[in-house]
Image (cartoon, rainbow, N blue to C red):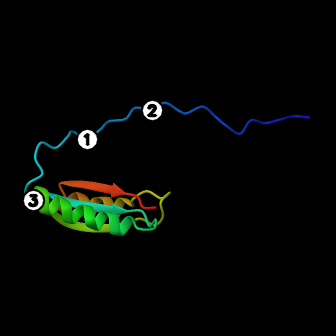
Amino acid sequence: MKLFDPTTPPAARALALAPRLRELRGLRVGLVENTKFNSDALLARLGARLAREHGVTVSRMIRKRSPSHPVTEEAADGLRRICDFVVSGVGD
């Protein structure tokens, strides 16, 4: 009998983080929700709070196809044109 182990060790990969923003006032934020329950409500409240407390403008909220799908290139390009930074959120 042969047994197969379906697990694999994690693959190491380089990760480059975006530089931290020094100031939010006057910046435009894009919101990406992942279709999970309440993710749209959570991001809407976060956007309102960022606007109220930090002077940002919410440019757009987009919805991903599902939690496991990435943002499409078309959607990412659209966000790049109208946003200074993006927040991606989850619900549940």
Q: Quadrant of residue 74?
A: bottom left
Three-letter residue code for mark 2: Arg
In front here: 68 or 48?
48
- Which residue is at a point 13% across and 63% down the rendered structure image? 52
* Res. 59 in view: yes
Tell me if residue 10 comes above or below residue 87 in the rendering. Answer: above
Task: Report helix, strand or loop for mark 1.
Answer: loop
**Label drawn at residue 55:** 3
**Disc 1 residue type?**
Ala
Of the pair 44 and 17, the residue shown nearer to us: 44
| Among numbered discs 1 and 2, the one appearing first in the sequence | 2
Mark 3 residue element:
loop
Q: Mark 1 or mark 3: which comes first in sequence?
A: 1
Residue type, mark 3 in image:
Gly
Residue 13, disc: 2
Instruction: Say which mark, if any, is on residue 18.
Output: 1
**3 or 2: mark nearer the eye:** 3
Callout 2: helix, strand or loop?
loop
